[in-house]
Image (cartoon, rainbow, N blue to C red):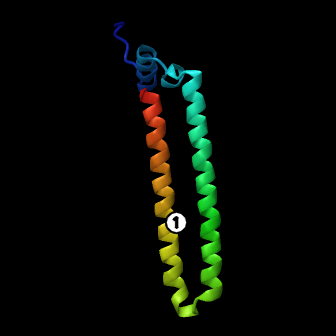
């Protein structure tokens, strides 16, 4: 060691050099699998967004004014929970591929 104090950035670069870049360890096959998973979940999120917007439209047109806000809130919460679930599933599948 040279005795010089190193910045966090320099230490991080050294550590990365020791362990290697995680993305460079992926084979072309793994990269293709990950890309396919991302495409699939992008499509699932788009499908869910369409269903959500349709549900919102039904709420706006078919619900009494006083019941609209709580119904919209429930629909929003459900939509966010489903998106979160999809994101978690996607991340888990990608992580499994990276660990193989």
Residue 38: percent from the left, percent from the top? 58, 42
- Residue 83 placed where, x, y %? 51, 58
Q: Position of residue 85 (x, y in %)?
A: 45, 55
Q: Residue at x 54, y 27 (%)?
A: 30
| 45 over 18 or under it: above or below | below
Please tell me which residue is depicted at 58% across the width and 89% down the height of the picture.
Answer: 63
Residue at 43%, 16% (x, y): give it.
Answer: 14
Q: Residue 41: where, in percent of width, then height?
A: 57, 48
Quarter placement of the C terminus: top left
Image quadrant where residue 44 sits: bottom right
Residue that protrudes farthest toward the top in the picture = 2
Read off the residue under disc 1. 79
Which residue lies at the image location 48% right of the left edge and 68% below the top edge? 78
In this rendering, would 85 be left or right of 46?
left
Please tell me whether residue 71 is drawn above or below residue 36 in the rendered image.
below
Q: Total label count?
A: 1
Q: Is residue 42 above or below residue 60?
A: above
Label 1 crowd (10 A; few <14 / some 14-19 / many >=20): some
Badge 1 marks a residue whose secondary structure is helix
* Left/right of residue 5 with respect to residue 73 in the rendered view: left
Residue 1 quadrant: top left
């Amino acid at each position: 060691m040279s005795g010089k104090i190193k910045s966090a950035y320099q230490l991080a670069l050294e550590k990365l050099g020791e362990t290697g870049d995680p993305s460079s360890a992926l084979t072309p096959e793994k990269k293709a699998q990950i890309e396919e998973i991302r495409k699939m979940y992008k499509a699932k999120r788009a499908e869910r967004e369409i269903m959500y917007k349709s549900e919102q439209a039904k709420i706006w047109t078919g619900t009494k004014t006083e019941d609209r806000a709580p119904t919209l809130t429930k629909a929003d919460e459900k939509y966010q929970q489903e998106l979160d679930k999809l994101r978690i599933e996607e991340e888990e599948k990608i992580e499994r591929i990276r660990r193989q």
